[in-house]
Image (tube, coloured by chain):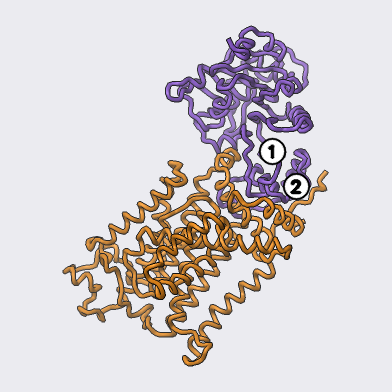
Amino acid sequence: MSKVVLPTKGPLLSGKGWTAFFVALIVVCAVAPVLNIVVPAGSPLHMSDYAVALVGKIMCYAICALAMDLIWGYTGILSLGHGLFFALGGYMMGMYLMRQIGRDGNYKSDLPDFMVFLDWKTLPWHWTFSDSFIATLILIVAVPGVIAFVFGFFAFRSRIKGVYFSIITQAMTFAAMLLFFRNETGFGGNNGFTDFKRILNIPIATQEMRMTLFALTGLTLLGFFLFARWLIGSKFGRVLQAIRDAETRVMFSGYNPLPYKLTIWVISAIMCGVAGALYVPQVGIINPGEMSAANSIEIAIWAAVGGRATLIGPIIGAFIVNGAKSWLTVAYPEYWLYFLGALFIAVTLFLPNGIVGLVRKWLSREKAQPVEPVQEARRAVAAEQGVEPDALKSLTVDAKGARA
Amino acid sequence: MTPDLMDAGAERAARAHGMPYASGSTESGGRAADFGRIVTPGEIDVTHGRILYLEDVSVSFDGFKAINKLSLDIAPGELRCIIGPNGAGKTTMMDIITGKTRPDSGTVFFGSTIDLLRHREADIAQLGIGRKFQKPTVFEHLTVFENLELALKTNKGVRASMLFRLDSAQSDRLAEVLQTIHLADSVSRLAGNLSHGQKQWLEIGMLLMQDPKLLLLDEPVAGMTDEETARTAELFLTLKGKHSLMVVEHDMSFIRTISEIVTVLCDGSVLAQGTLDEVQADERVIEVYLGR
């Protein structure tokens, strides 16, 4: 009777996957610092400070793209408000960095400069814990998490779905932006926070500190990647995909979708918050512009370009789009937005599975061995309806062979 | 519930289980000992010979009465077929039972103690009511195996899902269902790549994984080949007795194969009830089916 061969649970990463993972780990923690600090500036191998800042920034974006993928690619909920969580994490870190300036500001006051400028005498209540680094770390996770929880609870309980949800999240981040623009809110108004001097009493503008932040960002990205991998590989991850494909079936299978959606929504928001907190000390500024509608939409574009419902795709997408952005905005500053729009349209029309989907299609056409773990390849194909059946079939055959 | 209703239910339950029936042979029939019985929460109490009991249920959408004072009951282990012209309220009735639609009035009980109107979809599914949709609904981007695994009866909370691992009893159950639904050699195929008939089977398999007490099946053989239909009929007949089934179907030859009692719905209430031959001979049934 039970001669049926059931597939067993695959490893977290395949052999090659682990190799790539550790190569990335070594590059971030050892190679990049050596190239930046040890290799002299004249050498062709030298990694410039500009490159460190750029890659560090893009790694923060990649965390956002990964977070977006969990909620959009896997659960089918398109959030256009992730910029808010990113900015909230950034503001929490920014408050701490403002307090670290101490009396070295322009007004030589204990209060941050903008408060002196507004003639405030004491710190507002929400700055109470801003001088503690530990409290800041907690707030970086807690503030985006709690706001996402409250928002998500009411939105998902009311069964708001699809484009309505996207519009509401967009409105949410826009409302927050208007709020943060006001001086009375106590977040520095439209100038936000800048002019940071120290972190943990160590000067922030040194090469070593920049490299430390860079490595920390890389480690966080890799850590989140593994965590997302584990999450998606568990039954929890499959329930998320089931919610994306047929939510009523999920309900009639005995699952209440609300806690599932809420969990992944909060996880996604926290990831964005952490990314924002890593971003602010590296770029040295945070202002309400981070909450603008365009920023949140860009996160979705990175995920779409790289390939939804593949975990590596959005990371690649963040690198490609932002790499192109940093080059184009210098070379042809007026064309960047046109390029972004065209890219989004092209990806939507011709690359429903993003760049990763395209590469996988090529690989399967050449009858090559699939490079990525089969399970992921399968999901990648599955990511979007309306893929050519021949591509699907060949991949399915691969999947069978490797899994049996 | 009146004593004769209870007796009628007991009779049908006995027949469904292939047991001889004598009035008063059920646990409660003819006795008054059931006052003071302890109700276990979550346990389905079928001592009254009913697993599902709808009374005077009405629901209207924008003034249109989709269900109009519908009363219907199913005995434990019974296989009940529901037929009726389009718009008779068959699917709406299933929506009400499974918590998707709230009726304007009426009562819906699962067993004697569980008021279904006080539960939500997921709870109702966990209580033991499985539902197959009219259009086969499977998780297209998951494999056959993963589809069945998701449906498996287990703790369906978030944390339990994150840490879930199939144990050997569950694997055996999964393998057994795979055999039953003839998809054992398609374990790793994506559900979206299955044929229409196979998707229907997979959805039935997912219901079996849930191990429900009551199965609601909305047009289970639509789009199936004759062979698949015959196999489905065979499967349903083996399920009868262990589970209660409510089958909505238009395929009369399929109904003839599996049915004992057929209920005809029309305009949101029961028009006729009896064996297939009886209802087919009924003047009113002929009228609604052939038009007036």
Residue B134 falls in image quadrant: top right
Q: The orange chain is which one?
A: A
Residue A359 in sight: yes
Q: Distance between the residues labelled 2 and 1?
A: 14 Å
Total numbered circles: 2
Q: Which secondary structure, mark 1?
A: helix
Residue position for label 1: B196
Q: Kindly indicate whether the residues beneath marks 2 and 1 are on one polypeptide chain.
A: yes
Q: The purple chain is which one?
A: B
Along the line of sight, the residue nearer the viewer: B42 or A299: A299
- Residue A384 falls left or right of residue B177: left
For the C terminus of chain B, the quadrant is top right
**Number of residues whose C-alpha sits closer than 10 Å to that of mark 1, classed few (under 14), some (14–19) or many (20 or more):** some
User: Is residue A72 positioned above or below B29 on the image?
Assistant: below
- Residue A283 falls left or right of residue A239: left
2 or 1: mark nearer the eye: 1
Letter of the chain that mark 1 sits on in the rendering = B
Please state the horizontal and vertical placement of residue B45, each as a whole percent of the image.
Answer: 62, 27
N-term mark: 2 or 1: 2
